[in-house]
Image (spheres, rainbow, N blue to C red):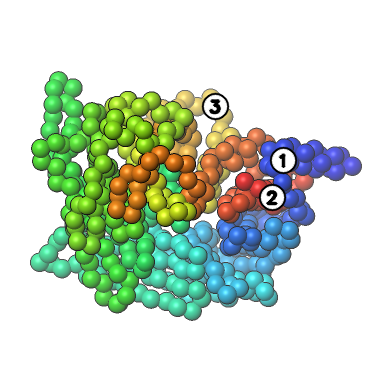
Amino acid sequence: MKSTIFLFATLCFVSTAFANTIFKDLIKLPKENKVESTFSGNISEQNTFHLIFTKNKKTKNYELFSYFFNGENIEKLAVIKGKEKYNVVSFHTTDGFLSVFFSFKKNKKSGIRRFDYNLLTKEITRAKAFDHKDYDDVIRRKSKSIFIYSNKKRFYIREFIGMNQYKEYFYEYEKKDKTVSDFFKSNSANYVKDDEFVANGSTSVLKVYYEDNHLFFTKNKPENKLYIGPVSLNLEKGKIETVSFLLEEEKLTPKYAVFSKNNKNPFKKITSYVYKKKLFELKISRKKGQVLIYNIADKTKFHSINLDASLSNKIIESEKFEGIETFLKQAARNRYKPTITVNEMKDGTARVRVDYVDIVYAYHNNWWWHHQQFMLHQQQFNQMQFSVPTGFGPASPNDFYFTSMMLKKEKHFFEFLVDENGFVLPKRILEPIYQEIDKSNYIDKLEKIKDYKFESSCFLTNSYRFIAYSKKEKGFIIYSSAL
């Protein structure tokens, strides 16, 4: 009876926090299975899958429980058992099959193994593992996963399309020409996922975009430095380098280009964004800002936009925006990094967003990874006894990501519309192809439910889903909520 009352109270709270919430049956695991984490992923506009990673205390093996959820019914899939501990790296779907890629370590070596879920029969097929050394990032699209690798000798990728198609591409660095090898040297590529609304994008030195079977890599590279005044203000003359590959032949042919060599008017900071095979470059100083637009194919600049008072009647302002002059002063400060993104509108125009983020901000193209890291660290944080002083010694990588996720995101950006030729259009409120979702808002709601642990979530176009363990009910529940 007490359990029923508690469950009813929890449902009332969640129904208030998450409108149009669907509650499904409780998922209970065998007592010998110790839960380690969960994972949630979107398959289609209606369907999601949810994984519960456990370790069997009797057999000492890892057991992975998998569930399919269509918004109304939960269906259990086959259980994966093994000696290796798995972590999700990517997933995609095709023709009623869900392919999930798991990373693992065996004898101190990293590997990837793919499992194909038959969503009709609920059976699982196990594919042969492959090496995961020199991994940079993964590009996840609806029906394919593209793994990017690089080392001192070559750049190469593995492309998985559906269940049965596999392709490998590579570029061996040439000894005579070190341009491309120097481009990839010492940096891992961070994929900018553009099949969703991109609010800020990546601030990494090396970024990669995928479009029309092409990979576009961009790298912000300072050339020389000027130190001005007693405070040694660092103004960097910078340039943007790009390397692009067409995924066609096994042996890749790189195309290299350099943009924006500043001579007369050095800017303190530069960054860029690739949109429809065009490079949008943002240059910032305390008193001046520009957006330059280039064709990547022929390296030509076809438009430039000054960030000044002439834009005032054409920009859409965020809630904390205080004018372009104040914006430039803030964005040029050492504690911030400028960002630029371009999102397509439903009428074919594009919305350019100029913003800045804290220097510890980290963009992750996989929201589920970002969310998992947050939840895992949050659980560890909640278990700490605050008698231990903080602030001593170097921060661990997890501390860095946790700090990044905990930042208060004040919206101080401004936006303007451009046509296909890069000309600024009159101010209008238009609907983007991909909806902008304040995902941190949903995390905040989850945090208020203290009964939950091992949460993981994913987002569909019009709904939000998560799986969580109820400590009082001693079982997992899955929720679906309208956005």
Mark 3 or 2, nearer chain start: 3
Splitting the image into 4 quarters, where does residue 25 fall?
bottom right
Label at residue 14: 1
Residue at 38% x, 25% y is 322
- Residue 24 on image: x %, y %: 76, 54
Q: Residue furthest right?
A: 1
Of circles 3 and 1, which is in front? 1
Q: Are marks 2 and 1 in contact (CB under 8 Å)?
A: yes
Judge whether 190 appears above or below 402 on screen.
below
| Drawn side of residue 77 relative to residue 332, left or right | right
- Which sits in the foreground, 248 or 204? 248
* 347 w.r.t. 214: above or below: above
- State yes or no: discs 3 and 2 in contact (Cβ < 8 Å): no
Q: Position of residue 446 (x, y in %)?
A: 63, 40
The amino acid on which the numbered mark 1 sits, given as a three-letter code, is Val
Residue sitting farthest toward the top: 230
Dot 3 amino acid type: Phe
Q: Which residue is mark 3?
A: 386
Q: What residue did someone put label 2 on? A: 479
Left or right? Give the position of 409 relative to 458.
Answer: left
Specify whether residue 205 is in view. Answer: no
Rendered residue at 53%/25% (across/down): 387
Reading the chain from its start, which is encountered first: label 2 or label 1? 1
Q: Amino acid at mark 2?
A: Tyr
Cα–Cα span, label 3 and label 1 = 30 Å
Q: Is residue 430 left or right of residue 379?
A: left
**Of callouts 3 and 1, which one flags the residue occurring earlier in the amino acid sequence?**
1
Q: Is residue 338 visible?
A: yes
Specify few, some or many for label 1: CA neighbours under 10 Å numbering under 14, 14-19, or 20 or more: many
